[in-house]
Image (spheres, rainbow, N blue to C red):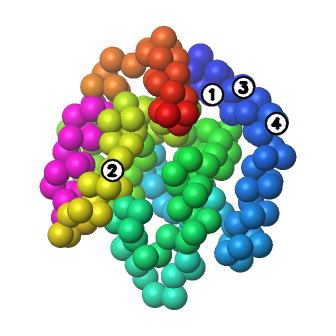
Amino acid sequence: MKRGLDFLMALALLLLLGIPLLLVGLVVLLRDGRPVLFAQERVGRNGRRFRILKFRTMAVAQTPSPEITAGETDHRITATGRFLRRRRLDEFPQLINVLVGHMSLVGPRPEVPRYVDLEDLRWKVVLSVRPGITGPDSLAFRNEGVELAAADDADHHYREVILPEKLKIQMQYAEERSVLGDVRLLFRTFGALRG
């Protein structure tokens, strides 16, 4: 049932927001060049890897760069990207990920492979459900960038402080999820975006 609702809602949102999203893509193209979309490998349900889609918010890397973003002060973020990130507009291409079944509207945020331990029981629980565009961990850590910007070592802080807390929240979601709970999380997300 959840997959069917995700598909219908993602399709409806893409149809409704199609022109505004094309305009956002055009702004990224005109101000920052190609590529317009950023695709990054993430770990999804049952440990399957997929490429998450976002509007590109960073300068195109000439050399390999860290997978973690050190908040708003990260020098790689473009002016356009800063605007998109503040309003979470960069996340909307993930509706395509929902449409094809890689993601759900609500669920644990998908992680990059190097932070995932498929042998860890916590990860097995979290990866038993589809990852989401939003979820309780997204809401709890919506200002994660500020915390990472203040850390001496953003990668270490993320791995040792933030990620364990996210895993606790994600495990609870995976074990207690419900359609009504997802609806509540969607409304909380819309509220957070407005204010």
Q: Nearer the viewer, mark 4 or mark 2?
A: 2
Mark linked to residue 62:
none
Task: Find numbered disc 1 in the image and state the secondary structure of the residue it sits on.
Answer: helix
Residue located beneath label 2 in the image: 144
Residue 88 drawn in magenta:
no
Disc 3 secondary structure class:
helix
Residue assigned mark 1:
6
User: 172 or 57: which is nearer to us?
Assistant: 57
Q: Which residue is mark 4?
A: 15
Decide whether residue 156 is among the magenta residues: yes
Q: CA distance from mark 2 to mark 1?
A: 26 Å
Neighbour tally class for label 2: few under 14, some 14-19, many 20 plus, Cα within 10 Å: some
The overriding secondary structure of the stretch rendered in magenta is helix
> Is there a contact, CB below 8 Å, between mark 4 and mark 1?
no
Cα separation, mark 4 vs mark 2, equals: 31 Å
Label 2 secondary element: helix
What is the spatial separation of the Cα atoms under label 2 and label 3, in whole angstroms? Answer: 31 Å
Which quadrant holds residue 175? Answer: top left
Say what secondary structure mark 4 lies in: helix
Q: Amino acid at mark 4?
A: Leu
Location of residue 65 in the rendering, given as x and y in whole percent from the top left corner: 41, 78
